[in-house]
């Protein structure tokens, strides 16, 4: 396994490409800087990725909710928001670059998320 967690997105891709070329069976766990970086990494066939900005923001929100006194609700809220986001990341990566299709899909995902969050 190779864990790649560097700040330079271009260097990240270079390392991923080298690893895939020379060690095709090597598992790659990679930190993405943001959603766009994550889409590119998905297309580079990494095995696991975490988005730096998303994950740190989610952890902070869950911690803040816990400070308000309800650990179980905080964990549930984090899960309810994180799970659809992870699913949409994988689905939207396939249409990234097709601005019209991507825009429609993002609006649909946001509407679904609004409905989900309005239930709680």
Image: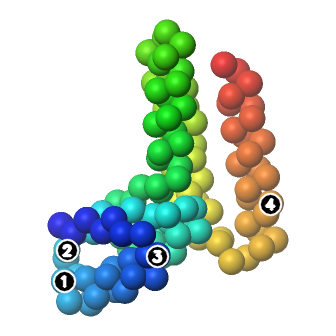
Q: CA distance from mark 2 to mark 4?
A: 36 Å
Q: Earlier in the sequence, mark 3 or mark 2?
A: 3
- Mark 4 Cα within 10 Å, few/some/many (few <14, many 20+)? few
Which residue lies at the image location 65% right of the left edge and 71% below the top edge?
95
Q: Earlier in the sequence, mark 3 or mark 1?
A: 3
| Mark 2 vs 4: CB contact within 8 A | no
> What is the total number of numbered labels drawn onto the structure image?
4
Q: Earlier in the sequence, mark 1 or mark 4?
A: 1
| Mark 1 vs 4: CB contact within 8 A | no
Residue annotated with mark 1: 23
Q: CA distance from mark 3 to mark 1?
A: 20 Å
Which residue lies at the image location 54% right of the left edge and 31% below the top edge?
61
Above or below 68: residue 9:
below
Which residue lies at the image location 77% right of the left edge and 73% below the top edge?
99
Q: Nearer the viewer, mark 3 or mark 2?
A: 3
In-front residue for pair 3/24: 3
Q: Earlier in the sequence, mark 2 or mark 4?
A: 2
| Mark 3 vs 1: CB contact within 8 A | no
User: Where residue 1 appears, x then y in whole percent?
Assistant: 18, 67
Callout 1: helix, strand or loop? loop
Residue annotated with mark 4: 104
Callout 3: helix, strand or loop? helix
Residue annotated with mark 3: 9
* Residue 47 appears anywhere in the view: no
Residue annotated with mark 2: 26
| Mark 1 vs 2: CB contact within 8 A | yes
User: Where residue 59 appears, x then y in whole percent?
Assistant: 46, 36
Q: CA distance from mark 1 to mark 2?
A: 5 Å
Q: CA distance from mark 3 to mark 2?
A: 20 Å
In-front residue for pair 103/31: 31
Q: Which mark is residue 93?
A: none
- Mark 3 Cα within 10 Å, few/some/many (few <14, many 20+)? some
């Amino acid at each position: 396994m190779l864990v790649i967690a560097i700040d330079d997105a271009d260097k990240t891709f270079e390392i991923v490409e080298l690893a895939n070329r020379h060690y095709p069976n090597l598992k790659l766990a990679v930190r993405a800087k943001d959603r766009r970086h994550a889409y590119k990494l998905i297309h580079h066939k990494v095995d696991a990725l975490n988005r730096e900005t998303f994950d740190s923001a989610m952890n902070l929100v869950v911690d803040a909710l816990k400070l308000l006194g309800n650990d179980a609700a905080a964990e549930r809220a984090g899960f309810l928001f994180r799970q659809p986001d992870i699913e949409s990341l994988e689905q939207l990566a396939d249409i990234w670059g097709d601005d019209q299709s991507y825009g429609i899909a993002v609006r649909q995902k946001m509407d679904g998320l609004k409905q989900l969050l309005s239930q709680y």
